[in-house]
């Protein structure tokens, strides 16, 4: 089973401004929505998502729920029940990530898409992430929420492929 | 005139460990020294270097002075005179970077190579850097000295080209 992240960052490594804003990212795409930077191809291989509570709240502000055909697990130590409008869309989880991954694999998941900075960092630190695709946006924000955080030791990756787009985005995939 | 940076970072954006160590970078190159990742081609276009005092001290620890045929300016607000072994090799400068760049251009420099994290950040923040080449090493260090720092505002860049190498290094050049 694959446990994957697929995410964009500024050239200085931020996934969002300090307040979580990602409008700079939407504005940087000059393809007029015609280019999806490989998202659909990736998404089609995914049957399950694991996201943090922050990501869930971000996604709830979107006009449409984007994960319609996928099983979605939301990590939260504080939420006691799912927001009413998501009752049939997400399941809450609190506990060991390793156990969660094992359970999802046993229940038939072939590829889990891990989203959200803190969630990705947790999966990296527990050596559970198998691959990460990072699309670098050609802008320096100067500050924000970092994709990566502290690690217990050096983590070597294997570069699989890189692709650049007319917008100046550069997408690189690594196995961990 | 071009004012350029050419530097390697870990995938999480560090140019060195917290203590300045860059051995992880040397160890990551599995080409046995046969691949220079475009350094000579770049270096051949450079006639002048501007580096910080930290970089000067780092380079003094190398077995050979690597900038033999180039004019080298060392930025320092504290050094009063050049170390004796570098007397004929470097000039000290303290003051406005904009004036320095203008002076070097007037004295015939065609391309200045800016090196060292803090020095690069200063040139970016004063809108003096014209291009940057970043070679991404496929390793997460978790902490260290960052290539980029705070900026006064968003800085957009133009992606020129990217190239990946068998070692997994990915080199991207941007104009600012």
Image (spheres, coloured by chain):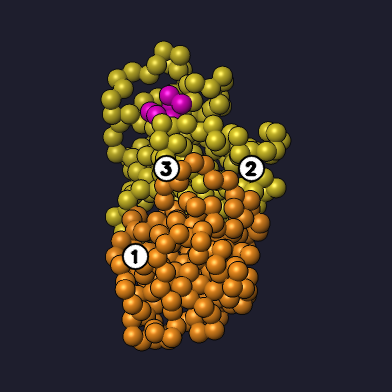
Chain colours: A orange, B yellow
Q: Which mark is residue B143?
A: 3
Magenta highlight: main SS: helix
Residue A19, percent across and down? 29, 65
Q: Is B5 one of the magenta-colored residues?
A: no
Q: Nearer the viewer, residue B27 or A43?
A: A43
Which class describes the residues within 10 Å of circle 2: few (<14), some (14-19), or many (20+)?
some
Q: Are marks 1 and 2 on the same chain?
A: no
What is the chain identity of the residue bearing mark 2?
B
Residue A75, percent across and down? 41, 67
Q: Which residues are magenta?
A: B53-58
Q: Nearer the viewer, residue B85 or A170?
A: A170
Which class describes the residues within 10 Å of circle 1: few (<14), some (14-19), or many (20+)?
few
Q: Which residue is mark 1?
A: A77
Q: Which residue is mark 2?
A: B37
Residue at 52 percent across and 42 percent down: it is: A154
State the CA–CA distance, disc 1 to disc 3: 27 Å
Q: Are marks 3 and 2 on the same chain?
A: yes
What is the chain identity of the residue bearing mark 3?
B
User: Dot 2 lies on which element?
Assistant: loop
């Amino acid at each position: 089973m694959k446990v994957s992240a697929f995410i964009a960052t500024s050239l200085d490594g931020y996934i969002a401004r300090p307040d979580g804003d990602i409008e700079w990212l939407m504005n940087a795409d000059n393809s007029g929505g015609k280019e999806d930077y490989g998202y659909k191809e990736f998404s089609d291989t995914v049957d399950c998502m694991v996201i943090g509570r922050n990501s869930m709240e971000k996604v709830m502000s979107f006009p449409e729920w984007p994960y319609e055909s996928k099983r979605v697990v939301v990590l939260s130590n504080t939420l006691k029940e799912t927001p009413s409008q998501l009752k049939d869309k997400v399941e809450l989880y609190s506990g060991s990530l390793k156990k969660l991954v094992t359970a999802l694999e046993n229940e038939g998941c072939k590829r889990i898409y891990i989203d959200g900075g803190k969630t990705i960092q947790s999966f990296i630190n527990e050596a559970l992430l198998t691959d990460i695709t990072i699309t670098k946006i050609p802008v320096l924000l100067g500050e924000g929420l970092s994709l990566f955080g502290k690690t217990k030791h050096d983590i070597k990756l294997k570069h699989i492929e890189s692709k650049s787009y007319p917008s100046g985005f550069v997408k690189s995939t690594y196995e961990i």
